[in-house]
Image (tube, helix red, strand yellow):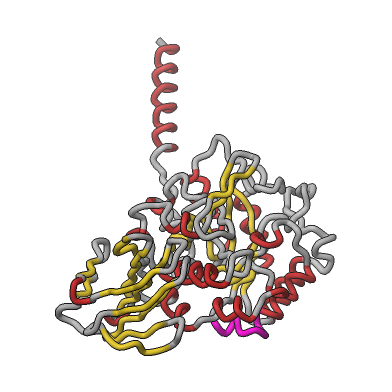
Amino acid sequence: MKYLVFVVVAIVCTHMGFSQGNTHKQAGGKFEGLSMTPPMGWNSWNTFATNIDEKMVKETADIMVSSGLTAAGYNYIVLDDGWMTKERDENGNLVPDPVKFPSGMEHLIEYVHAKGLKFGLYNCAGTQTCAGYPGTRGYEYQDARYYAKLGIDFLKYDWCNTEGITAKEAYNTMSNAIKKAGRPIVFSICEWGDNQPWEWAEPMGNLWRVSGDIYPCFDCEFKHPENWSSWGFMKIVEMRKDIRKYSGPDHWNDFDMMEVGNEMNDTEDKSHFTMWCMMASPLFTGNDYRKMTKETLAILTNKELIAINQDKLGVQGFKYSAEDGLEVWVKPISKGNWVVTFLNRSEVAKKINFNWQKHLIKDADFGFEADFGKVVYKLKDLWKNKEVGSTKKVFTSEIAPHDVVTLKLSL
């Protein structure tokens, strides 16, 4: 009888223990309000991969300020993969590479902060980063405390070497670790869109990637020998369907770092930058500022386009129409205004002949509407910085291959 009582009690206690253990849900814990407009800055990966060092970062910060990029809104410098040594120290701490950063990471961060800029680092949810450096799996709270102690402002968190864990829980854990560490840090979820982060990541992150890595081409797929692909910028723009409704202030769809200034021609760079602004994507440059042309700088600092990206309404644009290679993309902005971009996807020049009176633009996700039969808008060409009439008249122009014409429609 005593044995029977013991078994019953053991079963009841075990059941209660498991029940209690399974009833607690860990809520997302990001710092709110850090990215009410899409964050802007520079990231090392596109040009330098893991070939980064203290001198290059300081020179980048200097040019960022002196060139007018900072005045235009770019204020983050983010070191991507490869900033640490291949092993943690005896206490399990990450160690900045002393060869690449001989003065120490603290010194470098202080240097960047003294320029009025913000500083970001990279790690990964897996056991190793994508380039084979120590990942954060199992060290989330320890690493978060380290980042807070360093004084960083931004964490890009990748998704390599993550076998056996789920994306939602991994990013939730790191989000909470950052919050627990106490320093407000923008949390950039770089999960490539494989697990639909737009459906669950808003409480955890300030932005999330929607694709694999970008490639400096207009509309190509670059297949790597390791059986994965990088994507031209227009491939990324159209890769995910019906996700714009999930994006907005402090929770952005991230279309990846830009390739402006890297291998494409100036026309394609202009179109690339335009589409990132239309999509309300974070704007992170990925070029070498030390080799930047005046044309590239002019594209990256176009105040009119940046204002579209940074519009406080925070609505992502969408494709309104496409015919014979000529596409029309639209974006609602503040005060009842709109932006309309004509994009030539083809390899030959196209003529634009757009009769506003025959079009009614409706935003099915957010409820905005432009009825040109009832409302007249003034038109401004944002690349030419020139007033070009109103929607009373048919808009005509010629557009080169892979080029854009972007108009702001104002009441």
User: Can you see residue 405?
Assistant: yes
Residue extending furthest toward the front: 348
User: Can you give x and y, in whole percent of width and height, for residue 60 in the image?
Assistant: 70, 74
User: Can you see residue 110?
Assistant: no
Image quarter (top left, top right, bottom left or bottom right) of the C terminus: bottom left
Residue at image position (50%, 70%) is 273
User: Can you give x and y, in whole percent of width and height, for residue 358 in the image?
Assistant: 18, 72
> Above or below — where is 198 with respect to 356?
above
Residue at image position (65%, 68%) is 287
Give the side of residue 373 with respect to residue 298, left or right. left
Name the image quarter holding residue 351. bottom left
Of residues 393 and 364, the one nearer the viewer is: 393
Residue at image position (47%, 59%) is 234
User: Can you give x and y, in whole percent of width and height, for residue 50 in the image?
Assistant: 73, 56
Residue at image position (35%, 76%) is 339
User: Can you give x and y, in whole percent of width and height, for residue 366 in the image?
Assistant: 26, 65
The residue range painted magenta reads: 64-72
Q: Would you say the magenta stretch is mainly helix, strand or loop? A: helix
Image quarter (top left, top right, bottom left or bottom right) of the N terminus: top left
Name the image quarter holding residue 338. bottom left
Of residues 1 and 310, the one nearer the viewer is: 310
